Image (cartoon, rainbow, N blue to C red):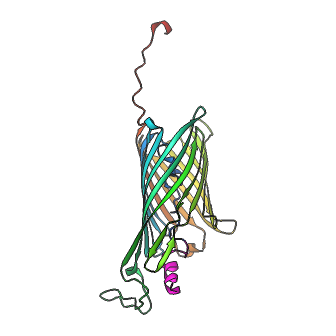
């Protein structure tokens, strides 16, 4: 295996030797837990559609960009939830696209709680755009010639299949979940280079605290790990009348690796649509070459209590009026 090729993979694509794809970075993770936990499908009691666009480290050439679309719904007649998701993660000369089918089974717990156990199957495609690379001795007039037989001059790609699993519990105040992706640690083979989709583990928790009739604050956390590295996000969201929210998040690896401070805001565009925005203030060494990161989330809920059917008309008995 060529050291030069591995160097290009690392420098231009942000890939290390053992891991082909890391979990996409989303600041408004609390608006779309299905991105990392299949057990969340259908837990909103509605047909829910969410679109996300994120541009990381603005003004840095080849910086990450992510797009995500998810849809999920409850299936009350079999006590289940069903969901679909598509993620596209671009970084430099590489792109990883992923389609997932999510399913879970839900059980009532206590007076208001629901416990869900879910699985997903993912179909991914890893693409390496060799025509985006440049070498010191390359010729790029009228075509692409890196003057290096080890580097592709055009697009090469490979596909992979994997599975994920998760547990999720929610009631009137508490939301907590654990999940894992890439349980098969599937391999991606590009010519002579083999990369592994490392297992990814997630822990998510949120707790709603009613401050007054119109104000509610929700502390939230998301921990991501492959058991070699950890990333922690701590957030606090303040909501007013359930229609407007603002908040702040901290993201870091440990006491010495602070990644950023994130400012969150959003509001409802009616009864069924919510718009969210996040700005990441970069605090890592990349702040000298970047103007931070931007993220936009749009969520649309088609119908509350979808699938429960229309309640029968109440007939009052005069004896009890």
**Quarter location, residue 140:** bottom left
Whether 105 is drawn above or below 151: the answer is above
Q: Which residues are magenta?
A: 1-18
Magenta-drawn stretch, dominant element (helix, strand or loop): helix
The image shows residue 11, relative to residue 292, as above or below, that is below
Is residue 4 one of those drawn in magenta? yes
Which residue reaches farthest left? Answer: 142
Q: Is residue 145 above or below residue 64?
A: below
Judged from this view, the residue extending furthest toward the bottom is 137
Q: Say which residue appears at 40% left-offset and 22% top-offset.
A: 312
Q: Is residue 2 magenta?
A: yes
* Side of 180 relative to 81 (left or right): right
Horizontal placement of 284 versus 265: left or right?
right
Q: Residue furthest top?
A: 319
Q: Position of residue 115 (x, y in %)?
A: 57, 41
Q: Is residue 312 visible?
A: yes
Number of on-image labels:
0
| Residue 209 image-quadrant placement | top right
Q: Position of residue 270 (x, y in %)?
A: 41, 42
Considering depth in this image, is 2 or 293 the residue closer to the camera?
2
Residue 161, how many percent across, how many down? Answer: 45, 62
Q: Is residue 92 visible?
A: no
- Nearest the viewer among 32 and 265 is 32
Q: Position of residue 268 (x, y in %)?
A: 45, 45
| Residue at 63%, 39% in the rendered image | 211
């Amino acid at each position: 295996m060529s050291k030069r090729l591995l160097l290009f993979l690392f420098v231009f694509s942000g890939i290390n030797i053992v891991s082909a794809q890391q979990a996409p970075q989303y600041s408004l993770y609390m608006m779309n837990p299905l991105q990392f936990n299949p057990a969340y499908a259908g837990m909103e009691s509605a047909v829910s559609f969410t679109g996300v666009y994120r541009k990381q480290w603005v003004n840095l050439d080849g910086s990450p960009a992510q797009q995500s679309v998810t849809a999920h719904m409850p299936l009350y007649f079999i006590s289940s939830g069903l969901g679909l998701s598509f993620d596209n993660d671009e970084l430099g000369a590489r792109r990883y696209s992923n389609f997932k089918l999510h399913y879970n089974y839900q059980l009532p717990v206590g007076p208001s709680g629901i416990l869900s156990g879910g699985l997903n199957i993912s179909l991914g495609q890893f693409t390496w755009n060799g025509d985006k690379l440049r070498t010191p001795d390359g010729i790029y007039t009228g075509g692409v010639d890196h003057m290096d037989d080890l580097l592709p001059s055009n697009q090469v790609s490979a596909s992979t299949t994997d599975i994920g699993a998760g547990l999720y519990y929610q009631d009137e105040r508490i939301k907590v979940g654990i999940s894992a992706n890439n349980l098969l640690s599937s391999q991606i083979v590009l010519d002579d280079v083999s990369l592994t989709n490392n297992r990814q583990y997630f822990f998510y928790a949120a707790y709603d605290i009613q401050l007054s009739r119109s104000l509610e604050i929700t502390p939230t956390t998301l921990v991501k790990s492959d058991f070699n590295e950890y990333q922690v996000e701590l957030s606090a969201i303040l909501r007013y009348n359930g229609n407007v929210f603002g908040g702040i998040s901290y993201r870091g690896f440990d006491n010495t690796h602070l990644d950023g401070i994130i400012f969150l805001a959003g509001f409802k565009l009616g009864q069924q649509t919510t718009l969210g925005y996040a700005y990441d203030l970069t605090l890592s060494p990349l702040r000298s070459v970047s103007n931070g990161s931007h993220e936009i989330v749009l969520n649309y809920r088609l119908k509350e209590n979808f699938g429960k059917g229309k309640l029968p008309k109440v007939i009052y008995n005069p004896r009890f009026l």
